[in-house]
Image (tube, rainbow, N blue to C red):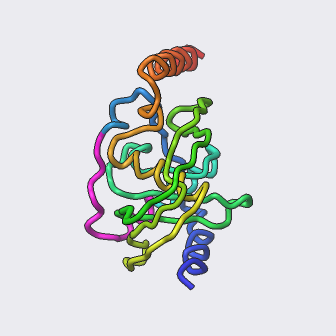
Amino acid sequence: MLAAFSKLVYKICQKCMSVLNILHYPDSRLRIKAKPVTTIDGSIQKLVDDMLETMYQAPGIGLAATQVDVHLQVIVIDISEDKSDPLVLINPKIIAQDGVEKSDEGCLSVPEIYEPIERAEHVVVQSQTLEGGEIEIEAHDILAICIQHEMDHLIGKLFVDYLSEMKRNRISKKLLKAQKLNATV
């Protein structure tokens, strides 16, 4: 019922959304630890709507508020093929995890870079909803990986932090060079 309501609200609000600027590694603002959301109000709804619009346009399957320079514990995810099943997590906490899965990860804040990362293959997450309720989600495989990836952003961590220093430096130099080239165009 809540998922259907969220989809309806999303469709109605699509007209009032805007695309946000996604911060790119090594921007230091990506390292800021997000604060818990204390009040779920219209500003949080607007943030979520804008984050969904930004994620879909990028295109991506997950986005944390930190990536758009808003340092609140808000995550949006949609792993559906037709981008019709948005998941919103506010103040999420992993309460259980098990298994190990290694898969290639990418990130909207680290464009065009994909590296194998090891994460739990199963997680249980508690979160608040946009309606202010509490939910518990059991996630496996790609959803579990995406939740962990986005939750890392909330503590100022990126998937490149799981790589060697040499690889991180190479990625940083490559992205800075691309940013400079784009700035001159």
Quadrant hosting residue 1: bottom right
Residue 27 falls within the magenta-colored stretch: no
Residue 23, image x, y percentages: 45, 36
Residue 38 falls within the magenta-colored stretch: yes
Camera-nearest residue between 20 and 85: 85
Quadrant hosting residue 107: top right
Quadrant hosting residue 93: bottom left
Residue 70, image x, y percentages: 36, 48
**Outermost residue, right direction?**
82
Vertical relation: 181 (above or below) 68: above
The span picked out in magenta is 32-47
Residue 155, image x, y percentages: 32, 46
Residue at 34 percent of width and 41 percent of height: 156
Q: How many numbered marks, from 0 up?
A: 0
**Outermost residue, front direction?**
99
Residue at 57 percent of width and 58 percent of height: 143
Residue at 37 percent of width and 40 percent of height: 157
Residue 166, image x, y percentages: 45, 17
Q: Quadrant of the C terminus?
A: top right
Vertical relation: 92 (above or below) 164: below
SS majority, magenta: loop
- Is 13 positioned to the left or the right of 94 in the image? right
Residue at 41 percent of width and 21 percent of height: 165
Vertical relation: 125 (above or below) 170: below
Vertical relation: 165 (above or below) 155: above
Camera-nearest residue between 152 and 38: 152
